[in-house]
Amino acid sequence: MEDNAARKDDIGSADDLEVLRSRHQYLESRLAALERQLSLTANEQAERARLKKEKLAIKDRIHLLLSRPVAGAGEAS
């Protein structure tokens, strides 16, 4: 039973990681589009700040997921 739960956690983590990477990539492209503009409205400036914070939080979450030990690693078969 525990093995099945561990496998589900690994699968969930892999799915989470893919979603986070995809969102991070979207944020990078949106921020790049904002940076190409000569000037930003107040709303665009607020959006840029919000996107930067979200991008950083996602980056931290990705690093956290990647640094977790793999379930079953080091266990004898």
Image (tube, rainbow, N blue to C red):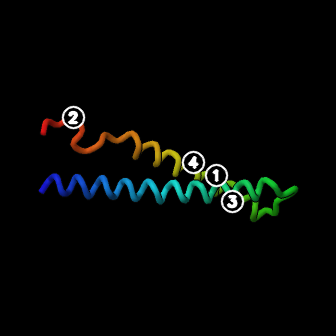
Numbered circle sitting on residue 56: 4
Q: Residue at x 68, y 54 (%)?
A: 49
Q: Which residue is denoted by mark 3 in the rendering?
A: 30
Tell me whether the residue at label 4 lies in contact with that at label 1, contact meaning CB atoms closer than 8 angstroms.
Answer: yes
- Name the N-terminal-most of marks 2 and 1: 1
Q: Amino acid at mark 3?
A: Arg
Q: Which mark is residue 52?
A: 1
Q: Could you tell me how far apart the alpha carbons at marks 4 and 3 are, in whole angstroms?
A: 14 Å
Q: Judging from the image, what secondary structure is the residue with disc 1 in?
A: helix
Q: Quadrant of the N terminus?
A: bottom left
Residue 73: x and y in percent read 24, 38
Q: Quadrant of residue 72?
A: top left
The Cα atoms of the two marked residues, 2 and 1, are separated by 38 Å
Residue 24 located left or right of residue 29: left
Residue 8 position within the rendered picture, expressed as x and y whole percent measured from the top left: 26, 58
Residue 50 % position (x, y)? 64, 57
**Discs 2/1, front:** 2
Q: Which residue is mark 2?
A: 74
Say which residue appears at 17% left-offset and 37% top-offset. Answer: 75
Density class for disc 3 (Cα within 10 Å; few <14, some 14-19, many ≥20) is some
Bin the neighbour count of mark 1 within 10 Å (Cα to Cα): few under 14, some 14-19, many 20 and up. some
As measured in the structure, the alpha-carbon distance from the residue carrying label 3 to the one carrying label 2 is: 41 Å
| Kind of residue at disc 4 | Leu
Name above or below for residue 68 compared with residue 51: above
Indicate the secondary structure of the residue bearing disc 3. helix
| Cα distance in 3D space between marks 2 and 4 | 32 Å
Please give the name of the residue rendered at 63% of the width and 57% of the height, measured from the top-left corner: 27
Mark 2: secondary structure: loop
Q: Quadrant of the C terminus?
A: top left
Tell me the amino acid under the disc marked 1: Lys
